[in-house]
Amino acid sequence: MKPAMLPSNKVVTIGPDDGILQAKARMTSHDIRHLPVVDGSNRLVGILSDRDLRSVLPYGMRQADDVEHLGRELSTVLVSEVMTREPHTISEAFTLQDALLQFQRFNVGAFPVVDEDQNVVGIISYRDMLRMFINFLGVEQPGVFLAVTTGSDPVLIQKLIERICAEKIPIASMLVIRPWEQDQTAIYMYLLTKNLSRIRKMVEEMGDYTLLNPLKWFLRQFDGAPSAGEGS
């Protein structure tokens, strides 16, 4: 899947000679935080973020209702004076994995998506990625997360799936992390049921799995604590 296919292909842009008040109004009307800046040939020349605008707009005059009241000085400031030049971009040929690694590497809020001629064909943001993973995981449907560790034998993954299916519990999504720790595999499932206690009891009785607290494990990755999962 190409990242350009994730957000809308009706990308909103701005020109370098447009004013920052016009850019602010465009961001507000489209409820977006980033504007690719393009020349007359739709070639990328920069990117303008809401953070860039906050650096020049007075604190009390950042909302849409305040735009018309901005001073004469601000009305003469051009996008080219505020934008970030030569921004990091993503090629429309990139895979989803490429896009994820780019976000991790550069720590930016959005990437313009360009073709081989540097023409803007889309934009992908953190919000697009979050929306995509929400859709992939199916978490907008009522359900619960089940997280376990088990041995490295693939049969143990199959065994858990078969047992859950035998209980007629729909699996909305599943993630397998291998290796987890040494010879361990971690399995994360989002199950379309509200009876988590029943599921946990069933897994404990199977004997081959150790229950994890998914959120507790995740938080521990960032506090310097050991990464071992733990049941609760």
Image: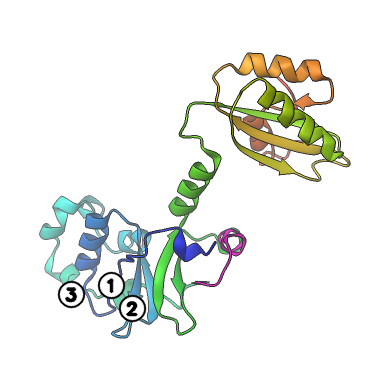
Would you call the spot at circle 2 few (<14 residues within 10 Å), some (14-19), or many (20 or more)? many
Q: Can you tell which of label 2 and label 3 is closer to the viewer? A: 2
Judged left or right of residue 35, residue 2 is: right
Which residue is the site of mark 2?
38
Give the residue displayed 53% in from the left and 44% down from the top.
136
| Image: magenta residue range | 91-103
The answer to whether the residues at label 1 and label 2 have Cβ atoms under 8 Å apart is yes
Magenta stretch contains residue 94: yes
Q: Nearer the viewer, residue 10 or 49?
A: 10
Judged left or right of residue 36, residue 141 is: right
Q: CA distance from mark 2 to mark 3?
A: 19 Å
Q: Nearer the viewer, residue 182 or 106?
A: 182
The image shows residue 112 at horizontal and vertical percentages of: 44, 69
Q: Is residue 18 above or below residue 54?
A: below
Give the residue displayed 74% in from the left and 20% down from the top.
203
Q: CA distance from mark 1 to mark 2?
A: 6 Å
Which residue is the site of mark 1?
14
Give the residue displayed 71% in from the left and 14% down from the top.
201
Secondary element at image label 2? strand
Would you call the spot at circle 1 few (<14 residues within 10 Å), some (14-19), or many (20 or more)? many
Q: Amino acid at mark 3?
A: Thr
Residue 203 - label: none
Which residue is the site of mark 3?
76
The image shows residue 58 at horizontal and vertical percentages of: 24, 57
Give the residue displayed 31% in from the left and 62% down from the top.
53
Q: CA distance from mark 1 to mark 3?
A: 16 Å
Secondary element at image label 3? loop
Q: Amino acid at mark 1?
A: Ile
Q: Amino acid at mark 2?
A: Val
Res 228 visible: no
The image shows residue 190 at horizontal and vertical percentages of: 59, 32
